[in-house]
């Protein structure tokens, strides 16, 4: 009986070992079906049966900035070539993905309604109950700007559930971007003219102050032009010295031909004394000796002349500064009229003819 029992046990053991691999195969197949095939089928069913078609409208544009030099700048060699398109494009790129732009276009086109058109599409449609932050996140999903920093060119792709909505949103982005660029140009022009106006006001105040100081000097000294007055005084002094020389000559001649009790000699001596006193007085005015006189002209002429020259230089400098400020103001006004910063489109907003999104095959392969 022992051999019989051993044979039966061996047969049972062999039967159990054969059923083990089959069970493992069924587990692997079931796992593959549950973890791979079923999710892929569900994703495919969602993509092809539930997900709504999305249409993409594209546009290409750049920021152009032109600043033409005036004729005076060209003649004076002061013209400069400037290019601010690159920095403006940087600002515009950030503006396209900003909450400010989303709020403006939402107020104009009702983005919530356009982005939530599918009745049931929780993956690709927008939840109409979301906040502005949720709308901004969804905006970043469907609005795709690309920017080449070296050239300043911006290309934009906008997705929506209808061709008309995609093109309308693209046009709205283009309009708001153009308005923002124009606003930047207006701010720059206003700053330039404001600075020039402030400099002109300062120069005008300085010129008024310098002229008032010169007028006070003339009123105090009663001398309009000390230079001309000095020339007159020098002519008078020269004439007195000539007369004094002639009087001495006449007196010497009288003494050589002396006649007793000649009444002309005392008169000639008195004439010489008077002329000498006048000469001394005139020299005192120039600080060349003698005491200062009382009155408006009591100061020595060198001091008066130095003060007058200082005031004159102040007036001349203030006048030149005022003329330069006026020229700068005129240039700033002219530049404000000439400068143009605008948005130039090299590809108009397109009207999509077929749906390009969602990319069902690509998403299906990624899911698999």
Image (tube, grey):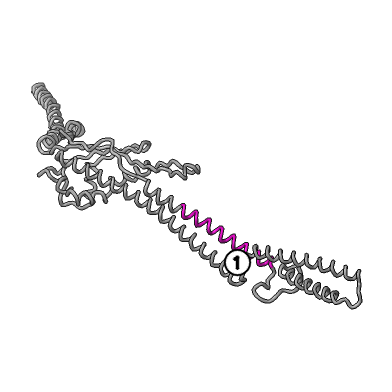
Q: Position of residue 84 (x, y in %)?
A: 39, 43
Q: Nearer the viewer, residue 256 or 183?
A: 256
Please give the name of the residue rendered at 12% of the width and 29% of the height, measured from the top-left corner: 26
Q: Of helix, strand and loop, which mostly describes the magenta segment?
A: helix
Density class for disc 1 (Cα within 10 Å; few <14, some 14-19, many ≥20) is some
Q: Position of residue 255 (x, y in %)?
A: 90, 71
Horizontal side of 51 relative to 66 (left or right) equals left
Quarter holding the C terminus? Answer: top left
Q: Position of residue 29 (x, y in %)?
A: 13, 29
Tag 1's secondary structure? loop
Q: Which residue is mark 1?
A: 224
Q: Nearer the viewer, residue 94 or 30?
A: 94
Please give the name of the residue rendered at 72% of the width and 74% of the height, measured from the top-left corner: 292
Horizontal side of 250 relative to 326 (left or right) equals right
The residues colored magenta run 301-327
> Relative to 28, is 269 above or below?
below
> Relative to 157, is 266 above or below?
below
Please give the name of the residue rendered at 20% of the width and 50% of the height, measured from the top-left corner: 106
> Relative to 120, is 313 above or below?
below
Asked if the stretch drawn in magenta spans residue 321, the answer is yes
> Relative to 28, is 295 above or below?
below
Q: Nearer the viewer, residue 48 or 66?
A: 66
């Amino acid at each position: 009986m022992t051999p019989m029992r051993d044979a039966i046990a061996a047969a049972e053991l062999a039967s159990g070992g054969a059923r083990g691999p089959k069970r493992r195969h069924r587990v692997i197949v079931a796992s593959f079906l549950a973890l791979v095939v079923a999710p892929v089928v569900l994703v495919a069913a969602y993509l092809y049966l539930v997900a709504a078609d999305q249409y993409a409208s594209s546009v290409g544009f750049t920021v152009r900035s032109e600043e033409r030099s005036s004729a005076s700048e060209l003649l004076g060699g002061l013209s400069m070539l400037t290019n601010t398109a690159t920095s403006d494009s940087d600002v515009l790129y950030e503006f396209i993905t900003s909450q400010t732009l989303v709020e403006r276009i939402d107020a104009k086109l009702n983005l919530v309604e356009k982005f939530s058109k599918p009745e049931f599409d929780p993956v690709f449609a927008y939840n109409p109950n979301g906040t502005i932050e949720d709308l901004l996140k969804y905006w970043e999903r469907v609005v795709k700007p690309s920017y080449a920093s070296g050239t300043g060119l911006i290309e934009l792709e906008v997705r929506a559930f209808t061709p008309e909505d995609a093109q309308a949103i693209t046009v709205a982005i283009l309009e708001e971007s153009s308005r923002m660029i124009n606003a930047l140009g207006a701010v720059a022009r206003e700053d330039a003219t404001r600075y020039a106006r402030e400099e002109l006001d300062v120069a005008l105040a300085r010129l008024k102050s310098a002229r008032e100081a010169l007028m006070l000097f003339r009123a105090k000294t009663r001398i309009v032009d000390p230079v001309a007055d000095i020339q007159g005084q020098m002519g008078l002094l020269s004439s007195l010295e000539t007369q004094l020389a002639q009087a001495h000559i006449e007196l010497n001649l009288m003494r050589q031909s002396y006649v007793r009790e000649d009444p002309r000699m005392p008169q000639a001596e008195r004439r010489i004394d008077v002329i000498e006193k006048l000469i001394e007085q005139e020299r005192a005015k120039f600080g060349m000796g003698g005491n200062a006189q009382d009155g408006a002209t009591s100061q020595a002429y060198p001091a008066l002349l130095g003060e007058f020259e200082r005031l004159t230089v102040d007036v001349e400098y203030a006048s030149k500064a005022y003329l330069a400020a006026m020229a700068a103001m005129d240039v700033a006004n002219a530049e404000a009229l000439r400068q143009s910063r605008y948005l130039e489109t090299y590809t108009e907003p397109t009207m999509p003819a077929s749906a390009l999104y969602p990319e069902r095959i690509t998403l299906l392969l990624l899911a698999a």
